[in-house]
Image: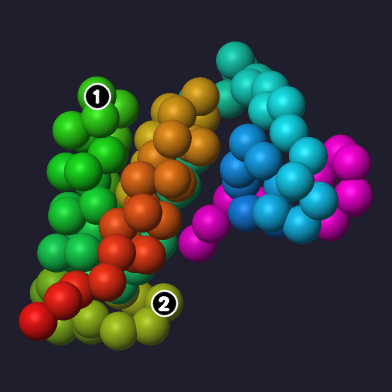
Amino acid sequence: MRQNIQCTTCMNEIEMSSICPICDAEIEVTFDKNRDWEVVYTTNNVIEAEMFAANIESAEIPVHVMSQIDSSRMFNVGDLAIVKIFVPYQFLIAATRIIKSIEDTEIED
């Protein structure tokens, strides 16, 4: 799950970024210091979540992985098997960029 914001120039809803991909306007992102941790990514794969978390942490961003997978009942799909990655609100954009760069990287054989 990605965080969306509204471009203040063209008013389109876009993924969190510092430059609008639609109108190329620079977006000033302000942070609410009263907000704590935000979900930067949701998946149902613990290994994927841990991999993303390790990459985010290597950028010196605090990260927390919360697994809601019910291992006692072997539920590992759907809404009963959610893993969330949290980062402090002020690092949300940087963590989103790290995840996006990993997802955009093509694996070559």
Q: Nearer the viewer, residue 77 or 94?
A: 94
- Picture coordinates of residue 41 (x, y %)? 41, 55
Badge 2 is on which residue? 79
Label 1 sits on a secondary structure element that is loop
Residue 21 image label: none
**What residue is shown with label 1?**
60
Which of the two residues, 95 or 44, is positioned nearer the viewer here?
95
| Residue type at the position of mark 2 | Asp
Is the stretch drawn in magenta largely helix, strand or loop?
Answer: loop
Q: Which residues are magenta?
A: 1-12
Q: Is 11 colored magenta in this rendering?
A: yes
Of marks 1 and 2, the one in the foreground? 1
Residue located 15% across and 83% down the image: 74
Q: Residue at x 59, y 51 (%)?
A: 3
Alpha carbon distance from label 1 to label 2: 30 Å
Residue 90 in the image: x percent, y percent? 51, 24
Horizontal placement of 26 versus 36: left or right?
Answer: right
The reply to whether the magenta stretch includes residue 9 is: yes
Instruction: Report the amino acid beneath label 1.
Output: Glu
Q: Is residue 83 visible?
A: no
